[in-house]
Image (spheres, rainbow, N blue to C red):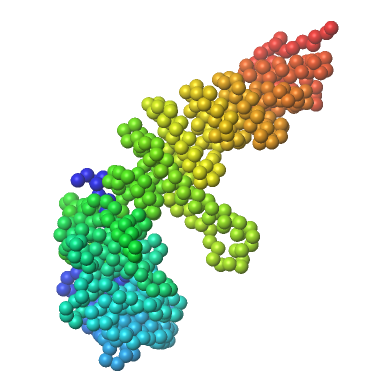
Amino acid sequence: MGEEDYYLELCERPVHFEKANPVNCVFFDEANKQVFAVRSGGATGVVVKGPDDRNPISFRMEDKGEVKCIKFSLENKILAVQRTSKTVDFSNFIPDSSQLEYTQECKTKNANILGFCWTSSTEIVFITDQGIEFYQVLPEKRNLKLLKSQNINVNWYMYCPEGSVILLSTTVLGNVLQPFYFRAGTMSKLPKFEIELPAAPKSTKLSLSERDIAMATIYGQLYVLFLRHHSRTSNSAGAEVVLYHLPREGACKKMHILKLNRTGKFALNVVDNLVVVHHQDTETSVIFDIRLRGEFDGSVTLHHPVLPARSIQPYQIPAAGPAPVTSQSPVPCKLYSSSWIVFQPDIIISASQGYLWNLQVKLQPIVNLLPDKGRLMDFLLQRKECKMVILSVCSQMLTESDRATLPVIATVFDKLNQEYKKYLDAEQNYTMAVEAGQSRSGPLLRRPVRTQAVVDQSDMYTHVLSVFTEKKETPHKFVIAVLMEYIRSLNQFQITVQHYLHELVIRTLVQHSLFSTLHQFLQYHVLSDSKPLACLLLSLESFYPPAHQLSLDMLKRLSTANDEIVEVLLSKHQVLAALRFIRGIGGHDNISARKFLDAAKQTEDHMLFYTIFRFFEQRNQRLRGNPSFTPGEHCEEHVAFFKQVFGDQALMRPTTF
């Protein structure tokens, strides 16, 4: 399988840590995404590594028994270590503070601590088999203050740091889940909900395992994912993932079902808002996108994998040791190994090999695996790093080998411009709100974020359309149809079309001598009026004489002042066009000769300079009876230049009657 077929890969720079062995225990903290390698209970060293910090934290601690759980508070200020089922030990890692350990016992009698979670740099939650205890840690006093507690029978727990939610499994079967939400010193109990088990269990033992539950934020919303190994309905074979939406307020609701169509051992990740389901038996993975249209059955939406199942891209483990010494080739990594442990949202850990990877989605291979361009665009527009891939799809669908039909091209343009318009509207609303002075009163006013899904006209022009129009082999009718389709789409979404797109249309029409089409486009206002467009038309006069009048009509419609029209033309080096225009409106007796001679000289076209110079000599002769310039006109420099290029004899002599 070529590299272009794999759409999932392990990150290039994994976190490397000492492998798990009888002496070295490995722990992972989901909140800080840190791996702890604890040697001999910490006596011979603890090394902490995270994906972002390339400088690991190393320290030693007294071996006071087997470490069950070890985590830093947010910002690595305080270390918490659980060694017994009753207590958690704390050490400050704050500069100039006491290094002495302090201990907190759980409050509930006869309770066993299942684990703990830091919810901020100084707030921690103990989860026991009899409830939940929320503490504030006071590092300078070296003690803890109980903020709130709740008694409830707990089988197991799960923490989602992104949503600051702890989920407790309660009841005998374990399928009633109780969420708690933590924020700035407060603990809120959210409505509990029940996970529907595949069938009514015969026994009264724990039926819902934490292995089959995950929590993740998808498209900004918190979901509980339940891996149901057998469908509730007997007619559908295979496992499925059920997504329960867990809102901040209101009840948890079953929203989506992801159909896996296979059975066996599965693991879940969430990458770039996609649910990735790994299947160990076949060593492949599939991805689901809950934003793509699924089948709605009246209560939930059923989704199938977006793409065919594929393995994660083969990965080479770099050989250990310093570069000059390492002559042996990299070792292929065993993918989908039974020693892999998967954490949310996108982490895969191999404790036996000593690696932590972030799982990544590769977008380019997906382009060829998803033939439906409309669905492909819906998919790509939701991805983080999508812009260059979208532009490559647009270019590809206009090439000779992969040319799409106009209706498909129109669909793609409409999807892009819908997203573009959404951003423009948000930007406009923000600007209006700021101007109205809302920013001072309302803190919620945020400038809209320009994501990569916003593909604007300059992106399309630079990367797609201007390149496409230069391809000689493409039939010009198709080129013009595509350009007009893009302009039609912009107009449909009431987006002001930039003049350079109109210029592209005009240049293409002129190149193929389609002057009648050009005339019609202008006559029926298919191409919007603009000053740059009027200037372009003026420059086309030598190819197409009516362009001069079309241009002037456009400038008049734009109610442009005459002297401004002259300035615009001169700035575009259209010196003759400017002169013709000024003669056309009868203003040529009052214009500045120097301005026109300056512009003519800048073009470095000597014959043009000669023509303009001669025109003003004739004007001087007509108005004053003498062709030479008066000192007030400040044209001495130009007279000298004229003499230098054409000689004294070329100057006009005064004519006498």
Q: Residue furthest right?
A: 657
Foreground residue among 30 and 316? 30
* Residue sitting at x 34%, y 83%: 132
Residue ID at (30%, 59%): 302
- Image position of 287 (left or right of 572): left
Q: Position of residue 395 (x, y in %)?
A: 38, 38
Q: Residue furthest top?
A: 657
**How many marks on residues?**
0
Picture quadrant where residue 190 is located: bottom left
Residue plotted at (52% across, 42% down): 491
Q: Is residue 353 visible?
A: no
The residue closer to the viewer here, 465 or 375, is 375
Relative side of 401 to 316, left or right: right
Q: Quick one: 274 or 117, which is closer to the camera?
A: 274
Q: Residue at position x 33%, y 87% from top?
A: 151
* Residue 463 found in image quarter: top left
Q: Is residue 611 above or below residue 602?
A: above
Question: Within the image, what quadrant is residue 219 found in?
Answer: bottom left
Compare residues 439 and 375 and report the one nearer the observer. Answer: 375
In this view, the residue farthest toward the bottom is 109
Q: Is residue 482 left or right of residue 404?
A: right
**Which quadrant does the C terminus fall into?**
top right
| Residue 531 placement (x, y as % from top left) | 62, 34
Task: Please indicate, yes or no, whether residue 198 appears anywhere in the rendered image.
Answer: yes
Report x, y in % for residue 166: 34, 76
Q: Position of residue 234 (x, y in %)?
A: 19, 65
Judge from the rendering whether residue 376 lies leftward or rightward of residue 585; answer left or right: left
